[in-house]
Image (tube, grey):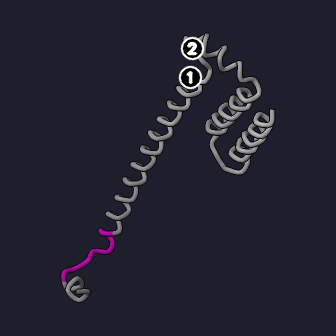
Amino acid sequence: MIFQILFTVLTAAAMFYFLIATRRSALRRLFVLVFFGGGIVFILQPDLTTTIANVVGIGRGADLIFYLSTLFLFFLCFNYHVRFMALEEQLTRIVRELAVRHPVHEEDAAVRR
């Protein structure tokens, strides 16, 4: 019972932080609401995970949570990879633009040595 109360409070606090304290798009806010709301429901009703798991053909609720967590982590890794690649491309464009605007001439390079 203490576990359920503690984790419900922590999950609710995290949900409100991500919904209120950070500026996110409506789609991301909806995702946060569903993700943390589902977490609160599963904390308060742990047998519900087993019921849902049996409906989708998985034996135990813990396995369902594990599979969903794995998929979620793969999604996060892919999302961060895509964002990193976009930032890398943007940085390359900026550096190229600066190089064109401020070229280094041979005599300037010789003086710097």
Against 73, is 80 above or below? Answer: below
The location of residue 11, given as percent across then percent down, is 72, 39
Q: Amino acid at mark 2?
A: Gly
Left of 102 or right of it: where is 113?
A: left
Disc 1 target residue: 63
Magenta segment boundaries in residue numbering: 99-106
Which residue is rendered at x = 57% and y = 22% of the image?
Answer: 64
The location of residue 70, given as percent across then percent down, is 51, 31
- Helix, strand or loop for disc 2: loop
Are the residues at dot 1 and dot 2 in contact (C-beta closer than 8 Å)?
yes
In reply to whether residue 105 is colored magenta, the answer given is yes
Q: Amino acid at mark 1?
A: Asp
Quarter of the view holding residue 69: top right
- Helix, strand or loop for disc 1: helix
Residue 59 tag number:
2
Quarter of the view holding residue 25: top right
Against 104, is 39 above or below? Answer: above
Nearer to the camera, 110 or 16 = 16
Which residue is rendered at x = 60% and y = 24% of the image?
Answer: 62
